[in-house]
Amino acid sequence: MSIAELVAAARNGSPRAAGRLLSLVEGDRRDEVLASVGPSSVRVLGVTGPPGSGKSTTIGALVGAYRQRGLRVAVLAVDPSSPFSGGALLGDRIRMAAHINDPEVLIRSVATRGHLGGLAAAVPAAIRLLGAIRYDVVLVETVGVGQSEIEVAAVADPTVVILNPGAGDAVQAAKAGLLEVADIVAVNKADRDGANQTIRELRAETKAPIVSLIAARGEGIPELMEAIDAHHRADSRTRRVARARAQILSLAQTRLRAHPDLERLAEAVADGCDDPYSAAERLLSEGSVAGRQTD
């Protein structure tokens, strides 16, 4: 099938066509696919937190809540890549199994290695595609460690950080920078000892709304949905510009990391033949020239 035929099939509800298009935007035909669908908009929710905090369980419950509203939902699960195959190690989302046979729900694992341009380029492209093929909501799950959280926060609004009671999770999350990207904090497994203490610690670390959850039982999901809806209602052009700025900077940084002159400039600085300030100016200047030549 041609790209136009795949787009038409995906808009008519074909999950196979949607999956094929996502594979294309993760590879070297990204620009071709995006040009064929044009601009689009879609509601994007980021969900992150430490491993084992219950992100997949929470997302499964959120998908159910959105489906009750009659919305088409896509889940992008951003996983660490296998060092052997480059595939997504956490691709088997058992806790989302209740939605696997729902044709209005698409669940896709996205490996963080091996994609053209990296996460910063792969995820926004997938989101734009999903909006264009008429999904209403995209939930992006990340593993809660490293640069991917910063990149996802640039495309998601809001970003929900999932934490568990006890074990100093609140303080550790603050140290790891997770709370910096949190628009909403959810304390999952809130029936455990130490939940109230964790909430008190979080209130000292963040001004974001805090919701208590027992996601495995669906408890607290209506309150989390209300916090998400309230965040959407408070959206403004200023916040949209800030998100766009973050996306542009993230994509620009990805392109600069792959610049062919970066290694040569780094060697010159390391050998004392150049200084990092001048090298940075040259990298930016050469990147601009390369971009104009490409255009």
Image: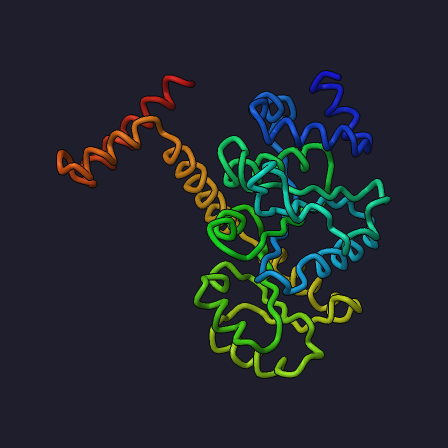
- Visible residue check, residue 219: yes
Q: Residue at x 71, y 68 (%)?
A: 223
Q: Is residue 50 left or right of residue 20?
A: left
Tell me how the rendering is colored. Answer: rainbow
Q: Nearer the viewer, residue 188 or 93?
A: 93
Tell me if residue 268 comes above or below residue 212 in the rendering: above
Locate the N terminus and report the quarter of the image it occupies. Answer: top right
Residue 88: percent from left, percent from top: 63, 43
In-image side of 65 versus 168 (left or right): right
Q: Quadrant of residue 102?
A: top right
Answer whether residue 43 is visible to the viewer in this image.
no
Split into 4 quadrants, where in the image is the C terminus?
top left
The vertical placement of 37 against 232, above or below, is above
Residue nearest the observer in this picture, 234 or 259 = 259
User: In which image quadrant can residue 127 be found?
Assistant: top right
Residue 87 figure quarter: top right
Task: Please name the residue shown 74% across and 57% down the image.
Answer: 62
203 versus 37 height, above or below: below
* Residue at (56, 36) in percent of width and height: 122
Q: Residue at x 59, y 20 (%)?
A: 32
Give coordinates of residue 266: x percent, y percent.
Answer: 25, 36
